[in-house]
Image (cartoon, grey):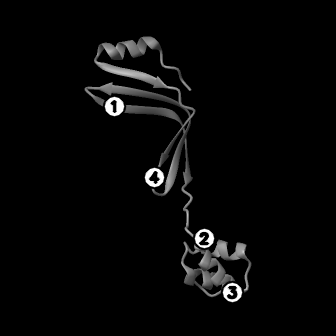
């Protein structure tokens, strides 16, 4: 993390920009399909004419977002009864099928989904 000099903050203030450094450990930006993670960030918050802006500088890495699938217990029981598969196998199939019971059944029985 780079420390912003107090003299630089004072210069900005003279120009009508109120700035402060935020001591962040990590910054995460969540999008629909991925998370953008900034490690060792330098984060500055500035206020100009009543509007706030945040600047982040650091090492960027991206990770795919993990989708959460709501799995209903009755679906798990149904698929276990229909296929004879274990609860873990059924849950994995439902996750892979995004909760779609018919697709999960096809996965569990080896049919082409």
**Nearest to the observer: residue 102 or residue 73:** 73
Question: Where is residue 72 drawn, in percent x and y?
Answer: 58, 73
**Nearest to the observer: residue 11 or residue 66:** 66
Q: Secondary structure at mark 2?
A: helix
* Residue at image location 64% in from the left, 75% down from the top: 93
Question: Where is residue 37 drawn, in percent x and y?
Answer: 54, 43
3 vs 2, front mark: 3
Q: Give how far apart the Cα atoms at labels 3 and 1 are.
A: 57 Å
Image height of 84 relative to 11, above or below: below
Image mark for residue 81 = 3
* Residue at image location 25% in from the left, 26% down from the top: 49
* Residue at image location 52% in from the left, 50% down from the top: 35
Q: Give how far apart the Cα atoms at labels 3 and 4 are.
A: 38 Å
Q: Residues within 10 Å of mark 1 (few under 14, many from 20)?
A: few
Circles 2 and 1: CB distance less than 8 Å? no
Of the 4 image quadrants, the one containing the N terminus is top right
| Residue receiving disc 2 | 95
Q: Could you tell whether 37 is left or right of 6 in the image?
A: right
Q: Quadrant of residue 88?
A: bottom right
Image mark for residue 104 = none
Question: Where is residue 64 drawn, in percent x and y?
Answer: 55, 56
| Residue receiving disc 1 | 52
Q: Earlier in the sequence, mark 4 or mark 2?
A: 4
Q: Earlier in the sequence, mark 2 or mark 1?
A: 1
Q: Earlier in the sequence, mark 4 or mark 1?
A: 4
| Residue receiving disc 4 | 31
Circles 4 and 1: CB distance less than 8 Å? no
3 vs 1, front mark: 3
Q: Give how far apart the Cα atoms at labels 4 and 2 are.
A: 21 Å
Q: Give how far apart the Cα atoms at labels 2 and 1 are.
A: 41 Å
């Amino acid at each position: 993390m780079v420390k912003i000099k107090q003299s630089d903050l004072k210069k900005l203030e003279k120009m009508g920009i109120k700035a402060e450094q935020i001591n962040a450990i990590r910054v995460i930006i969540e999008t629909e399909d991925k998370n953008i993670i900034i490690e060792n960030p330098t984060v500055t918050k500035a206020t100009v004419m009543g509007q706030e802006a945040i600047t982040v500088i650091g090492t960027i890495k991206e990770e795919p977002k993990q989708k959460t699938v709501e799995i209903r217990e009755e679906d798990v029981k149904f698929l276990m009864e229909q296929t004879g598969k274990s609860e873990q196998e059924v849950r994995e199939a439902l996750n892979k099928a995004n909760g779609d019971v018919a697709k999960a059944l096809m996965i569990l029985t080896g049919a082409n989904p």
